[in-house]
Amino acid sequence: MLSVADIRLFLFDMDGTLYLGDQLFPFTKELLATIREQGKRYLFMTNNSSKSVEDYVKKLARLGIEADGGDFITSAQATIHYLKNHHPDLRFYVGGTKSLLAEFAAAGLDVTDEREGQIDAVVLGFDTELTFRKLDDLSRLLRSDIPYIATHPDYVCPTEYGSVPDCGAVTEMLWYATGRRPVVVGKPEPLMPELAMEREGVSPAETLVTGDRLYTDIECGIRAGCKSLLVFSGETTREQYEAAERKPTFAAESCAELLAALKAL
Ligand SMILES: [Mg+2]
């Protein structure tokens, strides 16, 4: 039984949970409006570090959802937090999009995508502007024992025409070349929900992580000590859920059931 009386913060995966590709699910607008009307809070939580928060605001606007920058917690934001805490004052080579480099720079990090001068650490994002020159740079840099961080571990990113290689696929290429694996920041690691809960001043027991993937969204919720809701509107089948060792607190066909549970309060 999906019970949300105690929940004050809803952390939503987006693709497969609130929409599929460019198709908004029919219940999504009402779900978000209902959460707001009840004085609760929601944040969109995404691993995709190829897009900036501004890009996502525009994407949601195209789908008919009004959002602003404060409505997001992203793997890029969590990585900035991680780098400032664990590797202050380093110069980072970033294998990522121009927008990721700009976001890091705006947060006060010393970043470059040119392999020249002193480089103290390597950060890899979902680089939709990846070139062989960058792979060569990364391979050379990772020969020395410098810190190596990836924004998220996803192997593939879904598109309307199928999957394309994501950050985790590139870290595998670099593993073959260098034998190195990165420290990973995004889902399933718990840093994004931890930052969101700190920002909103709520406890794990008051937080529900909702998503369509067991090994990223749900595992992330479990590791952060939050409640979790798996929906079958995206990647995961009921059979996979039944077979899973680590199960979410709740499972539902879609977020339509979450809307119904909120309306029943
Ligand atoms: Mg998803």
Image (cartoon, grey):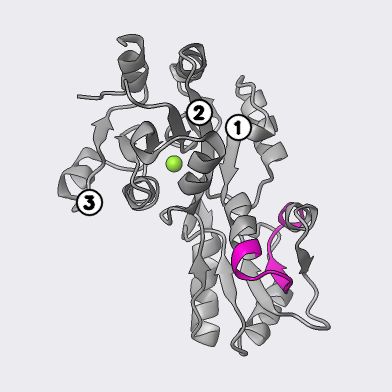
Q: Amino acid at mark 3?
A: Arg
Ligand 1 within 8 Å, label 3 CB:
no
Q: Which residue is mark 3?
A: 246
Q: Residue farthest to the left?
A: 242
Q: Position of residue 241 (x, y in %)?
A: 22, 43
Neighbours of disc 3 within 10 Å: few (<14), some (14-19), many (20+): few
Q: Is residue 99 above or below residue 145?
A: above
Which image quarter holds the N terminus?
Answer: top left
Q: Position of residue 186 (x, y in %)?
A: 50, 55
Q: Position of residue 119 (x, y in %)?
A: 74, 80
Q: Which residue is mark 2?
A: 42
Give the residue at x 62% y 28%.
60
Q: Is residue 2 magenta?
A: no
Which image quarter holds the C terminus?
Answer: top left
Find residue 104 and report its image quarter: bottom right
Label 2 vs 3, first from the N-terminus: 2
Q: Which residue is mark 1?
A: 71
Magenta-tinted stretch: 84-100
Cα separation between marks 1 and 3: 28 Å
Find residue 109 and report its image quarter: bottom right
The nearer-to-camera label among 2 and 3 is 2
Cα separation between marks 1 and 2: 7 Å
Q: Amino acid at mark 2?
A: Tyr
Find residue 114 and report its image quarter: bottom right
